[in-house]
Amino acid sequence: VAIAVDLDETIPIFSFDPLRVRQACVNLLNNGVKFSPDGDCVTITSRNGDGQVTIAVEDHGPGIDGAYLTDLFEKFMQIDGGSTREKDGMGIGLKLVKHYIELHGGKVWVTSEKGKGSIFSFTLPKAPSAEKAEQPARA
């Protein structure tokens, strides 16, 4: 599975916890790769928006039935949790993504259609960079 990157070059420098945001991206990319067919491509994009940055990971895997979307970010949630489960994992990756992003004041969501893949997205509010925050205010 290939990974394509489409980054918005207009995103300004802003403060966030790079370890936590990187882990959120890695968790989403791992899921995208895990559930994509061989030879497919998972795409990660970033977009500069009004006061926020949006990151999205899109795959073309099996998709998710709409009945499961509201519970998907709960701890130990696995859609295929039975003894015949084909994919490994503990079911905590999406819960961690949600936790890390909400700690930043952002939100996370998924859009998916059974048989057509999924797009996992999150926003991060753009706060002043640490360098700007340390500068004294000028009158």
Image (spheres, rainbow, N blue to C red):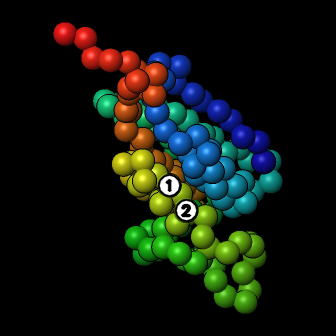
* Residue 71 visible in the displayed image: yes
- Please provide percent x and percent y for residue 95: 52, 66
Q: Is residue 85 left or right of residue 69?
A: right
Q: Identify residue for label 1.
A: 100
Check disc 1 and give the amino acid type. Tyr
* Mark 2, other Cα within 10 Å: few <14 / some 14–19 / many ≥20: some
- Give the quarter of the image for residue 22: top right
* Mark 1, other Cα within 10 Å: few <14 / some 14–19 / many ≥20: many
- Please provide percent x and percent y for residue 135: 38, 18
Where residue 84 is drawn, which disc sits there? none
Q: Residue at x 53, y 57 (%)?
A: 97
Q: Are marks 2 and 1 in contact (CB under 8 Å)?
A: yes
Quadrant (top left, top right, bottom left, bottom right) of the C terminus: top left
Mark 2 to mark 1 CA distance (whole Å): 6 Å
Q: Is residue 95 left or right of residue 4?
A: left
Q: Identify residue for label 2.
A: 96
Task: Tell me the element at label 1.
Answer: helix
